Image: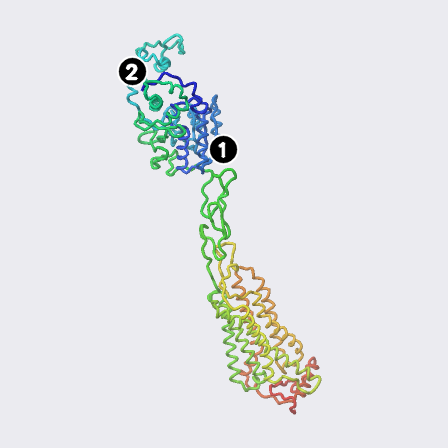
Amino acid sequence: FQIPQISYASTAPELSDDRRYDFFSRVVPPDSFQAQAMVDIVKAMGWNYVSTVASEGSYGEKGVEAFMQLSREAGGICIAQSLKIPHEHKPSDFDKIIRQLLDTRYARTVVLFASDEDIRGILNASKRADQVGHFLWIGSDSWGSKNSPIHQLEDTAVGAITILPKRATISGFDAYFMSRTLENNRRNVWFAEYWEENFNCKLMSSSKKDDSSRKCTGQERIGVDSKYEQEGKVQFVIDAVYAMAHALHNMQRDLCPDVSGICPEMELAGGKKLLKYIRSVSFNGSAGTSVTFNRNGDAPGRYDLFQYQRSNGTGSGYRAVGQWTETLQLNMEELRWPRGEQDVPVSVCSLPCRAGQRKKVVKGMPCCWHCEPCDGYQFQADEFSCKLCAYNMRPGANRTSCRPIPIIKLEWHSPWAVIPVFLAMLGIIATIFVMATFVRYNDTPIVRASGRELSYVLLTGIFLCYIITFLMIAKPDVGVCSFRRVFLGLGMCISYAAMLTKTNRIYRIFEQGKKSVTAPRLISPTSQLAIAFSLISVQLLGVLVWFGVDPPNTVVDFDEQRTIDPELARGVLKCDITDLQIICSLGYSILLMVTCTVYAIKTRGVPENFNEAKPIGFTMYTTCIVWLAFIPIFFGTAQSAEKLYIQTSTLTVSMNLSASVALGLLYVPKVYVIIFHPELNVQKRKRSFKAVVTAATMSSRLSHKAADRPNGEAKTELCENLEPNSES
């Protein structure tokens, strides 16, 4: 190409934002590409917390600025510290930088945009601080694959990843440059200075070399009398010159098609038009790779990646581990680390949170966070939040999901069930035995005197009190829940209705006897049954209303055993009967019990052998004590995790005890006499109602004088066949 002898210096500001357009720097990949390659390396390693160190000046500061900008755009990389090495530095400045880097110890990765001398200073300071192997260096192209920055500091450089523009050795240039001498290269005004430096000699008196230097002979030969190595950027210098030549050639072809050389249109074209032609060139460069420019005027970035490694077999040295040509290609298997780690070393502000923990990000530092466990019934919904499981779920073992809460019920083999069932079975056997005995000796005086009809009603109620134990422990379903509603209060209601009818009859008889010889109304067996069944019907009516308003069903209660530790949480399969409904169902029976107790107290003065008033009284006193103990236990355990077991066991045991007290005090003495002393089971002589009441009244008045009480007159039975108008 014939490059015209014209100057575009006057138009240089137009070429690139008030800066002289440097074709060489544009052919060499810019700092932004180098910084992008470094960002890609950092991300590929999983490092998100790094520091930067730059030499003061255009190269270092712009390189770090580009790296920080690109890391912000890429996201996921935080800059722990960004430090600068001053121009006029001292060893203490490097020591200070190392101390500052150690303030953020978790940021082991250090990105270096620094000169050879500054790199040596940093490595030396880390060695003085006894931090060999701590830092993970990423060096820019100023480090590249040079040995000079790490000479005698190889240990501190092990593991360093460096970047170098992809380049090739131009063989023709070696032959050309090694043939240059002082005679054939006079056009280069800097060549004489290079000659003196290269051969360490002095050419002329105006030379900067001191007088002690030897005189140059001019016969020295490059590469023979001195060490020669082709500068790595020769390729880019050649390509820059050719890029300018191609641009001028294309410009001349377009503007001066009929003229060889420069035409007036070309002289007046200006720098902006020339810049347009430069950016549009495309040709194969000196190394065989294409030379093009992007819209910013930069050549494509192509880099080789090296790692300084130490090997027992081959010694230390740089090893190619990948390349970057707009995308990263890194051979992870080829990497070796300073402390012999098998895996990539960590350079993060915070370690990843374990499963079941959420990140609480530190304000202004997205790469730093605190790990907070998801507690209670929460699970890890995503990286940054915990959420509650559904009401019927609990977190899994690692708290990354929810799983169903196990559903339980009161099992037959549970200790809470075994004891009530054992008591109920004994009670049922005893009740059946008593009932069979009464049926067998149905016409004997003792059975008849106790009021056979109400006795059987009372035994039925006692039997149902025992039966409810099995319904309360059985697996809940609609049928079981229906029977629970019916029989929960029915057994007690039947028992206390029968006893209330008995005590009320005795009370009315003796109260009436004080006023007249006429027997009170409704004391016959039929009347007594009618009264008892009327009282029982109130309970049945209430149950029917309950069925209509709220049909029975089963529910799974997840709140009852919702323990602090989700692993212990259980859902309880139960009938939809609340504690209040249980008490309401038993409330009417308790009212009958209290009323019966009142009548038992009022008839306490009646002689014991006249009737069952006193045994009924003792039964009611004991029963009241049982239920007074039941209520605080039942409601006091409402918040307990063992509520299902405690309340069910307490309720069934209380009903068993109530039934057992009535059975023991009212029927065991009679059965004992019937079986073991049949001679006492004989008919007493009949008396009129007036005689019986008079004897009872006198006996009551004289009960404190035991010696005066006539044995034969006072100890009579108020028999069931007592007629109001019968004669003595």
Q: Position of residue 12 (x, y in %)?
A: 43, 21
Alpha-carbon span between mark 2 and mark 1: 55 Å
* Viewer-proximal residue among 694 and 266: 266
Circle 1 crowding by C-alpha within 10 Å: few under 14, some 14–19, many from 20 = few
Residue found at the far top of this picture: 205
Any part of residue 39 in sight: yes
Q: Position of residue 715 (x, y in %)?
A: 64, 85
Residue at the image position 57 percent from the left and 70 percent from the top: 585
What residue type is disc 1 on? Asp
Q: Position of residue 372 (x, y in %)?
A: 50, 45
Q: Which residue is mark 2?
A: 179
- Between disc 2 and disc 1, the foreground one is 2
**Element on which disc 2 rests:** loop
Label 2–label 1 contact, CB within 8 A: no
Residue 429 bears which disc, if any?
none
Quarter location, residue 311 = top left
Q: Quadrant of the C terminus?
A: bottom right
Circle 2 crowding by C-alpha within 10 Å: few under 14, some 14–19, many from 20 = few
* Viewer-proximal residue among 470 and 290: 290
What residue type is disc 2 on? Ser
**Element on which disc 1 rests:** helix
* Viewer-proximal residue among 182 and 55: 182
Residue 103 bears which disc, if any?
1
